[in-house]
């Protein structure tokens, strides 16, 4: 049983998947920072009135009177639609980046497939022997 588990855990696909998940999590943090710290402030500054999407919400309870999302969540239920917009932009950026990576990989694979395969050594040797016999 331990041998089967060891074979499964060391198999290439499992290791590749683990590395992909770890890199994906790190990439997600980078994109979150890019959107939250760079893109959204620029979009907010360009919009009339200096929009700050992180504080846009709709109070779902009459008890909520706060102006910031953090305080409003402490007071009751809120619909944080500004936060949703930020997360949707994160998703769009990650999806676009993954599209570019997959597209690049497909182009590289297509180039490899387009190259003619070299004939096996046996075939080359047999061709040389045939040519030598034809000359005699």
Image (cartoon, rainbow, N blue to C red):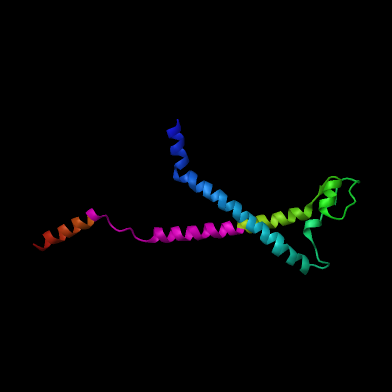
Q: Nearer the viewer, residue 48 or 13?
A: 13
Q: Based on the displayed image, in which of its 4 quarters is residue 97 positioned?
A: bottom right
Start-end of magenta stretch:
96-122
Seen in the picture, residue 19 relative to 6 is either above or below; the reply is below
Q: From the image, which quarter does the C terminus lie in?
A: bottom left
Q: Residue at x 83, y 67 (%)?
A: 49
- Label total for image: 0
Residue 76 placement (x, y as % from top left)? 85, 45
Q: Residue at x 53, y 46 (%)?
A: 18
Residue 105 placement (x, y as % from top left)? 49, 58
Q: Residue at x 27, y 54 (%)?
A: 120
Residue 134 appears left or right of 92: left
Q: Per the image, is 105 magenta?
A: yes
Seen in the picture, residue 36 relative to 12 is either above or below; the reply is below
Q: What residue occupies the far left of the structure in this picture?
A: 136
Q: From the image, which quarter does the N terminus lie in?
A: top left
Residue 118 appears left or right of 104: left
Q: Nearer the viewer, residue 81 or 133?
A: 81
Q: What residue occupies the far top of the structure in this picture?
A: 1
Magenta span main SS: helix
Residue 95 placement (x, y as % from top left)? 61, 56
Q: Residue at x 74, y 64 (%)?
A: 41
Q: Per the image, is 37 magenta?
A: no
Q: Based on the displayed image, in which of its 4 quarters is residue 27 positioned?
A: bottom right
Q: Nearer the viewer, residue 82 or 75?
A: 75
Residue 133 placement (x, y as % from top left)? 11, 59
């Amino acid at each position: 049983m331990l041998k089967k588990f060891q074979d499964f855990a060391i198999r290439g696909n499992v290791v590749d998947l683990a590395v992909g998940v770890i890199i994906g999590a790190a990439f997600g943090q980078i994109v979150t920072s890019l959107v939250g710290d760079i893109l959204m402030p620029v979009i907010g500054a360009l919009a009339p009135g200096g929009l700050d999407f992180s504080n846009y919400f709709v109070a779902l309870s009459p008890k909520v009177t706060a102006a910031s999302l953090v305080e409003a969540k402490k007071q009751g239920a809120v619909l944080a639609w500004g936060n949703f917009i930020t997360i949707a932009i994160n998703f769009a950026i990650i999806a676009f980046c993954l599209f570019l990576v997959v597209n690049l990989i497909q182009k590289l694979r297509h180039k490899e497939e387009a190259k003619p395969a070299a004939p096996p050594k046996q075939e080359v040797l047999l061709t040389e022997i045939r040519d030598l016999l034809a000359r005699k």
